[in-house]
Amino acid sequence: MIADIQTFFRHLADSGINLTIFYDAFDFDRFVKGLGNTLLLIVLSAFFSIIIGSAGAAVLTLGKGPATVVVRAYVALFRNTPLLVQMYFFYFAIGSIMPVSQNEIGLPVPLLGSFSWAVISLSLYSGAFNVETFRSGVGAVHNSYEEAALALGYSRAQAFISVTVPLALRFSFASLSNNLVDLTKATTVAYAVGVAELLYVSNQIWSDSLNTIEMMNVMLLIYLGLTGAVVFIINRVEAATHLPGFGLGVG
Amino acid sequence: MGDLNLFGRLLEWMPFLLKGFGLNILMSVLAITIGTTVGTFLGLGQLSSLRIVGWPSRLATQLFRNAPWLVLLFYCIFLMPYQVSIGGSVIVLPSWLRATIGFSFPVAANFSEIVRGAVNSVPRGQWEAAEALGYRRSATLFRIILPQCITRMIPPWMNLYALLLTATPLSVIVGVEEALGRTQAAVQAMSDSRMLIPIYLSLLAMFFIYTWPINRLSLMLERRFRTK
């Protein structure tokens, strides 16, 4: 079966469409590793950015004074500066003052590698957008729900966590799926600090095998598939958490 | 004393960095101009009742909206000719110009969605009222619907511009010497690791000072138009 596929793509290569990844084991390995790194970047950054987003939104809603100022400043700073410059700032500037350990043969090993910095920087960038998303989700929940909870004897924090947040989440899905699509697209920026993600390995492959156009098209299709998958997953979560009679357009 | 020295060296390099930032602004202004023009046609195309116009416009919009900016940039850098000859005269396309064209694609697609969203946000009843008064579809669109859309399109358009400006440093990856590229060059020339944090911070500040007012203004306009 696999041999058949390989012969098919070898023949295809003879006719001008050279997709080395489907018949060359080395290129295939690199490509799969790159795809895996991209997926890992998406999943980890999405996870942390959602945590940052919810924490920030909670502070903006419940907190007052210096804490909200800090969150507002964080959102403004990360939304109004380029992700690439942020990543370089973390990787080169902050990375230069981080402690460096040594491995067994005495070579310096930085505490955080390029992959970790990419996850940190993507999470902080996407997290800033999620703060806004969740905050406006909280704003969309009508006051009467919180008042009802308070009347039932909930404290403000309890009412926020058990009543407002579950409802706010349902208002946030559209904007959240937008942010996560943007995050998926933004993982390509990790290329610049040398993370071996999809764009990076594709670049290596087309440099070696001189099949630039083919690899670019494959890569474009994969990214379109990934963004489609993100939208699909969020839609499924939205459908699964749907409350009858509650939502946009209904009471 | 040492801090003062660092600050002085930073100031020394500032004109060099600011010139690079000028290229960022130039690229963003060109790309937003091209993107807005193409995006207007794409957006109106999406609304067309002709299937042969509507379908390709929707496809192009979705394609360029969902593809990573960096991937589109790579397409333009690698697959575009270095020079074009029109009627015997040869026009060289420098990499910054090809990068600008690369940025125009996602901008056009995003603007296309802004146009479509703005037109769809006008209540359906206005189309019906115009039809009852004997307006043709195109006359309704251009004389009744679109004039109301302009104000609604300005805030998202400004956000799009801010997004575009913060995307322009990506062009450093394909070898354009803009602000980030010049920062890297300055870092290498100074070869002093103490300069890394101040110089990158000042680069971040440059972008922030330019982009933040645009986003604030857009938020203000959005609030004003909403209350009307």
Image (cartoon, coloured by chain):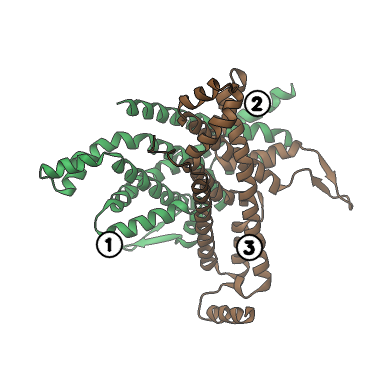
Quarter containing the C terminus of chain A? top left
Chain letter matching colour green: B
Quarter containing the N terminus of chain A? bottom right
Asked if disc 1 and disc 3 are in contact, CB closer than 8 Å, the reply is no
Q: Which residue is mark 3?
A: A204
Q: Please, what secondary structure does the residue beneath circle 1 have?
A: helix
Q: CA distance from mark 1 to mark 3?
A: 39 Å
Q: Nearer the viewer, mark 2 or mark 1?
A: 1
Q: CA distance from mark 3 to mark 2?
A: 41 Å
Residue located farthest toward the front when viewing the structure as drawn: A152
Q: Please, what secondary structure does the residue beneath circle 3 have?
A: helix
Residue A117 can be seen in this image:
yes
Tell me the colour chain A is drawn in.
Answer: brown
- Label 2 marks which chain's residue? B
Q: Position of residue B50 (x, y in %)?
A: 24, 58
B134 w.r.t. A162: above or below: below
Q: Position of residue A210 (x, y in %)?
A: 58, 69
Choose between A140 and A6: the one closer to the eye. A140
Q: Nearer the viewer, mark 3 or mark 2?
A: 3
**Mark found first going from the N terminus, 2 or 1:** 2
Q: What amino acid type should be assigned to the residue bearing mark 2?
A: Gly
Q: Quadrant of residue A157?
A: top right
B45 w.r.t. B144: above or below: below
Residue located farthest toward the top when viewing the structure as drawn: A65
Q: Position of residue B170 (x, y in %)?
A: 54, 47
Q: Which residue is mark 1?
A: B52
